Image: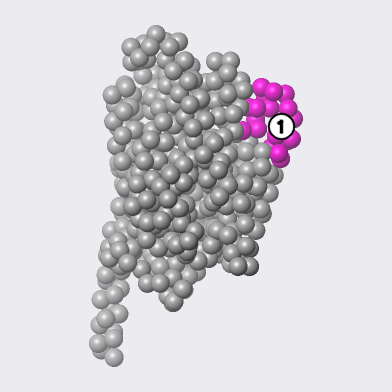
Amino acid sequence: MNKKHQDHDYSLEAIPQSEKKGFLSMLVVMLGFAFFSASMIAGGNIGTSLNMGDFLKAVIFGNILLCIYTGLLACIAGDTGLSTHLLARYSFGQKGSYLLSGLVSITQVGWFGVGVAMFAIPVSKVTGINLWTLIIVSGLLMTATAYFGMKSLTILSMIAVPAIAILGSVSAGKAIGDVGGISGLLAIKPSGTMTMSAALAAVVGTFISGGTLTPDFTRFSKDRKTAMSTTVIAFLVGNSLMLAFGAIGAMVTGQSDISEVMFTQGLIIPAIIILGLNIWTTNDNALYGSGLGFSNITKQPKSRMVIINGIVGTFLSMILYNNFMTWLNILNSFIPATGAVIIADYFIINKGKYTDFKTTKFKSVNISAIIAWVAGVIGAYTIPGITPVNSVLTTVVTYVVLTKVTVKKEVKVEVAA
């Protein structure tokens, strides 16, 4: 009981069946996860560069690719009850998993800080409230809800998801009305140019790194069906809505963030509400995932790491916002390959079945996984096409080939002995 009180999010063990949740609870959490501000910016860039037909194709096919990646990770978590970081021990090894945990956690703390600044700066401009007051108050509030774990994430998502969907739809509807309805929107000519592969890369790229953390949340699902279905719905509905809000706003007003569109529409209070809730759900998920990641490395409870990460992210928010967004994007491109190793190891190498986590003796470092990860990162930058998809596929092929070759060599050595 005491252990449960100290670490109610099971940072270093599988989720017990008694703590698992049903479809509705998981759906609101995953929708809150998918409501991501960066997706609106991507939607704005795509919407102003493609005609509506091509935009819809990019959104649908891009989110299908995302659903395959995140859905497979969700399935593994639904089966095992393990976080992304603990799953990585099977493929990367005990200490090898620190690579994934370190990459993800540093990146997520960075994006938490950027998110705090993204909320505080526009609200300060509109309301006149001191910028640092807003940064500290909002950062501490977001840290507090992440500290309380899955229960507070569920409650927050139940408030945020319908609020963002309703207020965003009202604003988008007003924007469409301002240009003469759907026909007026369709008549707007693209102001830029973008290939379909670049558009697909933008749709997939905005969330594939965050999507690698899908197991951190879906491990609470009562079964793999709940884990996969809620994940697929969240990305097909939630991410598509964010992309659509961004596209409509950018096409009509030149602003891709729905909160900025609402500011221009004079909807100040709704804009602050939707901006705050959108960033809050995103930041809580980022802080939650980073807490689990550093817990895997330090063996400290997730809740303790969340407090440290939240304080660091809050006080570095302006520095991160002004100087490190490009660096964080580069780190983002390194993450999908780690999820690809987990997928390949579980479904192809281990045929969809892992040994019990408590009794498994893990390797220290699995060199094949590290090499496959490096190959995936190189593939992302060198192979033409959809960057994150290239990274994932390169990683899967490399990992499977290296593992098969290594196993054959080990068998030969054993026979010779």
Task: Write the residue at 45% across / 53% down.
Answer: 21
Task: Write the residue at 48% across / 20% down.
Answer: 170
Q: Nearer the viewer, residue 325 or 230?
A: 230
143 w.r.t. 79: above or below: above
Image coordinates for residue 17, horizontal then vertical, percent: 45, 62
Image coordinates for residue 276, horizontal then vertical, percent: 59, 33
Q: Is residue 357 left or right of residue 409?
A: right
Toward the top, the furthest residue is 180
Image coordinates for residue 294, horizontal then vertical, percent: 57, 59
Query: Mark 1 falls on what kind of element?
Result: helix
Amino acid beneath label 1: Leu
Give the residue at mark 1.
131
Task: Give the quadrant of the C terminus.
Answer: bottom left
Task: Write the residue at 45% across / 10% down.
Answer: 178
Q: Is residue 131 covered in magenta? A: yes
Q: Is residue 330 covered in magenta? A: no
Q: Quadrant of residue 237?
A: top left
Toward the bottom, the furthest residue is 417
Q: Is residue 330 left or right of residue 342?
A: right
Q: Quadrant of residue 54?
A: top left
Q: Which residues are magenta?
A: 119-137
Work out whether residue 199 can be spotted.
yes
Figure colour scheme: one colour
240 w.r.t. 399: above or below: above
Work out whether residue 378 can be spotted.
no
Dominant secondary structure of the residues highlighted in magenta in the image: helix
Image coordinates for residue 128, horizontal then vertical, percent: 72, 24
